[in-house]
Amino acid sequence: MNEYPEFNGWQAVRSLGTGHCGESFEITRDDGFGLAERGALKIVEISAESDPEAAQQQHDRLEAMARSIRALDALGEHKNILPWRDHAIRRFSDGSGWQVCLRTDLAVPLERYLRTHTYGESTVAGMGAGICDALALCHERGIVHGDIKPQNLFVSGSNFEGALELRLGDFGMAAIVPDAAGDFAAPEVLCGEAPGAETDLYSLGMVLYWMLNDRRVPFVPLPPEGVSGSDLAIARDMRLRGDPIPAPLHGSSALQAVVLRAIADQPADRFQSAEEFRAALLGAVRQRQPEAAPAGAATAAAGVSAAQQQAEARAARQSRAAVEEPAAPPKRKAKRAAGIIGGVVFAALVILILAMAFGGGSSKKEPGTLTLSTEEAKLAPKETLQLTAELRDSDGKRVSDPEITWDSSAARVATVDSDGLVTAVEEGTAKITAEVKTDDGDLSASCTVTVTKDEIEITGITLSQTSAELKVGETLRLTPQLTPSDAPTDQISWTSSYPSIASVKDGVVTAVAPGSTTITAQANGHTAKCTVTVSAAAEIRKVSCTSGAVNMTTAGETVTVTFTVNGTGLETLASSAKVYAVDGSIAQVGTLQRTAGGETDTYSATVTALREGLTTVAFEIRDANGVTHSTTCQVSIVFPVVETPEQPDTPADPNANTETAVG
């Protein structure tokens, strides 16, 4: 018998470890073709609080997590986000708490990965820039992670030996199982403030510092010494006190300056956006000197590189030589003095160059970056492609309305107009180049366009729907029909007029936010459109009993209890509403009746007294994520006591004849 859990067709095969957020498992299932799909499952069990206020707080945390998961689903795929693929929040039948099941991709936590891998400065900066990209998208949609740390960053994919690409995961866990340690949390969060977008950036800065500091947070002992719980507590107190944080052990001065700014004590001194943080990281890498050894190399024997071992041995030999070397002759001393002076001059030049790089001199700034919406495209003759160019300055800020010059290397293959619209002409390959002139230099970016002539020419296209209505988080597959019907479908391109409302990929539309957008399918110059209207997903904000406590005094007496539900899209949730008496032998509850009222629905039911006693009438309704919202009202049935009056004694009649007759 398998002792590991099952979840929605997935079978756990081994435990991946237990943390303060619950236990994780590796899971697998048959993909239908005899191959095994693999993933990960996290299970968190939460006990219900006996105190009503604490219980409501726990329930609110679960709702917050459900909203976070729903919002994350609406983001679609992002290479630096590890999404929840499936989830369920279930209440135990005995009311003792909840079980939260979350399925995601199989991945290796960054903290575990770095135990056996070395890494350099460019890896640290590249990882930080990738997570900044993910945070920029999350913060734009109002999603705050709230618990960024090495255990919540993951290396995923089948080739962990390649370039280190990190993904941010475990969204929403901080809402239900807060991390009491907070070794990577901002000082204001440690003081009780709610996490926000700005504190996410601080925590990311702490992770980068940790990587550059041999995987140690500020103020704790460095390897090979161990770190105790008291060491971590003292380190947190020093951060709360505002003590200056020392530079990390590794990294160029430019990268160190970026990381130290990210974890500055005062929020005003830090980066104010993920885009600004990302630009500073990439700028620091461009300025860096060649790395002598991997930054933050693992201290385990398996993780220390040969280059680092050689460098340490060389330093030891030089140290011994400095101690044991006999006094040098005068001429040798003169040469050594000249060498020392030369070294000092060289160091001064290095300092001057670094000062100029950080704005202290008159050196030329980096010109920024120019990117195109795509780097490769395949078109059929007469088909068009709209290219867009994005210009960012050296600080990573987007430049609006830049003057772009467009050119085609082979106009006979593909032409491009002044707005970046590419038109395929005949078979061949052409490079479409965008150029822009800035005060700090010229920039260019290109897209390789391959034009192929299909054997079957597409003469028309239609879609399975011309209009559709979706709720946030829902998806819709649009099926294209080409003319002729046997024409290849790989030439169809899909676009959304407002991707922030609904995105589209290969005909699958995902609703992102309320509004209206147009989905367009294009093939060989022919187009078909579908108007998609997105409305807010069903959401429950509050459930309450409006009738108050019920008191009855007669068997068979009937009263009506009422409950209200406040939220959006409530009509889709009505079928899940139910009402019942906890002790059905004391009171009987009738059929539930609903009265719709826009964002507030009213439910009512009759309660009939059966016998004396105290019970509770409970009302429950589930939201779109399966989370149960409930409220109760107390029912008291007490029959009045009917007392029988006492009968007084009959006084003797003074006139009555009490003598006994004598015969």
Image: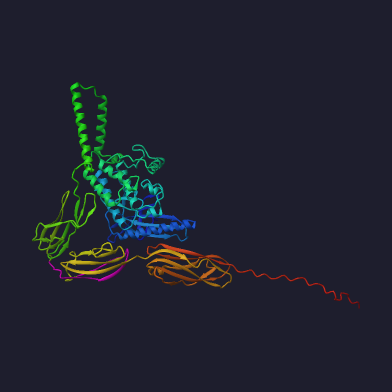
Bounds of the magenta segment:
455-481
Direction right: furthest residue? 663
Residue 429, placed above or below residue 365: below
What residue is rendered at 47% in x and 56% in y?
Answer: 54
| Quadrant of the rendered image containing residue 620 | bottom left
Q: Is residue 318 left or right of residue 195?
A: left
Q: Is residue 649 left or right of residue 200?
A: right
Q: Is residue 471 left or right of residue 656?
A: left
**Is residue 465 visible to the viewer in this orientation of the structure?**
no
| Quadrant of the rendered image containing residue 348 | top left
Frontmost residue, 183 versus 166: 183
Frontmost residue, 32 versus 540: 540
What residue is rendered at 22% in x and 32% in y?
Answer: 344
Percent coordinates x, y for residue 607 in the rendering: 52, 70
Percent coordinates x, y for residue 373 in the rendering: 20, 58
Name the quadrant of the C terminus: bottom right
Residue 463 is inside the magenta segment: yes
Direction bottom: furthest residue? 663
